[in-house]
Every structure is written in structure tokens, then in C-alpha cells.
Image (cartoon, rainbow, N blue to C red):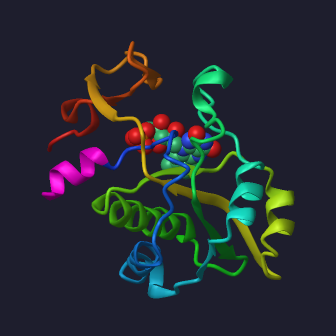
Amino acid sequence: MDLQSLLEKRRTYRKFDESKPISAEDREAILQAVQTASSGMNRQSLRFISVESQEKVSRVFDLTHWAASLPADQGQPKPGERPVYFVAVCAHEKSSPFVDVDKGLAISNMTLAAMDRGIGSCIIGNFNHKKMQELLDIGEGYTCNLVVAFGYPTITSTIKEVAAGEDLSYYLDDDGQYIVPKLKIEDLVRRV
Ligand SMILES: Cc1cc2nc3c(=O)[nH]c(=O)nc-3n(C[C@H](O)[C@H](O)[C@H](O)COP(=O)(O)O)c2cc1C
């Protein structure tokens, strides 16, 4: 896939084929993508938890909330549609002031590497942080405020250019496929 197509296809997916596992090789490719990410001061203070057992995946899923912009029966994956793999992103309390940028870069690399292999993802910040901390036994001095869900998508998600001021909420079209409004470059960038 050429880069532009990959960037467009790497959307947020919230419906997966739960019967299709992600191979160990593909999991390694997703994790390997973290190593090449830039890091403020090159501190590399992030740590990642690869949630591989299906029992743990299911327990992580139960703590997460999906698609706040949609009615609950539309956004939350139903049985059979749930992700099959999670990566939790953990930051040390003594991280560099740029740690949130590091998280974004690492997650971007992982989700792009996944999509390059046909695997969709959803970044999730809306979950029960305390219970996640306990469930994943996140180490002393670390916190986790983002997890990334992965699976083979069974829906499409397409970006749609909108003008500044228009509604930016994502929605489902008549066929139940995601449409994600994105601002035009002219509205995002000021050229000087
Ligand atoms: C930091 C961050 C946190 C997010 N948290 C959630 C979440 O808790 N639940 C969810 O369903 N989607 C979550 N998303 C996905 C966004 O809703 C999604 O990125 C946005 O709607 C744009 O869609 P796109 O990723 O296809 O461009 C999150 C995305 C980011 C970057």
C-alpha cells in the first residue's frame, strides 16, 4: 500500500472479526514499530504491555468505553465484534515533559504497522484507569492512560472533508460504515 493510502485507511475501527486472531508474527511487527519512534530527549520512558491471552483481552475490553459520539448500541463492539489484542501504553512518573508526544508517536507507528498488515485499531483513553492498573499489574511509578485495541475490521471507515465550523462528529452512514469528518488543509494550515 502506498503511504497516502495507508494514512487514509489507518482509521479508528470499532467492529472486528473476533474469530480471527492476530498471529504472533503480526503482533511482533506491531511491537517492533515502537522501537523506531522518536522520543523527546530520546528518554524512551514509555513501557508497553502486550495483552495476548484471550482471557486478559476480554477483561481489558470490559473496562473500556467506545464511541462516545454514537448511541451505545452503535459504537460499543458486540460479542463477535470485539478486538482480539490490546497494547497498553505506560509512562513513568519521571518521564520527560514530552511524554504525551512520545505516546502519540509510538501509537501512530503501531497502528500504521498494523494497518499495513490489514489489522485495524482503536486508541482508547476512556476506561476505568484504577481497575486497568490492577488488572495489568502496572509497575510501581507507572501509569497507563491509553490502550490500543486491534483486530481485523469488518467495517470500513472513510474520511470526508468538511468546512471549518461544520459538525466534526463521526457517524455511521446508511450501510453502517464509519464516516469521519476532517477539516480541509486550507482550514488547518496558515501559510506565511
Ligand atoms: C488520545 C485518543 C483517545 C481516544 N479515546 C477513545 C476512546 O476512549 N474510545 C473510542 O471509541 N475512541 C477513542 N479514540 C478514537 C477517536 O474517537 C478517533 O481517533 C476520532 O474519532 C477520529 O477518527 P480517526 O481515528 O478514524 O481519524 C481516541 C483517539 C485518541 C487519539
Q: Relative to 159, is 110 above or below?
A: below
Location of residue 119 in the rendering, given as x and y in whole percent from the top left corner: 39, 56
In the picture, which quadrant includes the C terminus? top left
Q: Relative to 2, is 154 above or below?
A: above
Residue nearest the observer in this picture, 91 or 20: 20
Location of residue 104 in the rendering, given as x and y in whole percent from the top left corner: 47, 62
The question of residue 166 being in magenta is answered with no
Q: Relative to 64, is 26 above or below?
A: below
Q: Relative to 43, is 113 above or below?
A: above
Instruction: Identify the magenta region.
Output: 1-9
Which residue sits at x=68%, y=61%? 57
Q: Is residue 145 left or right of residue 119?
A: right
Location of residue 38 in the rendering, given as x and y in whole percent from the top left corner: 38, 77
Residue nearest the observer in this picture, 51 or 68: 51
Which residue sits at x=44%, y=80%? 28
What secondary structure predominates along the stretch shown in magenta? Answer: helix
Residue nearest the observer in this picture, 83 or 101: 83
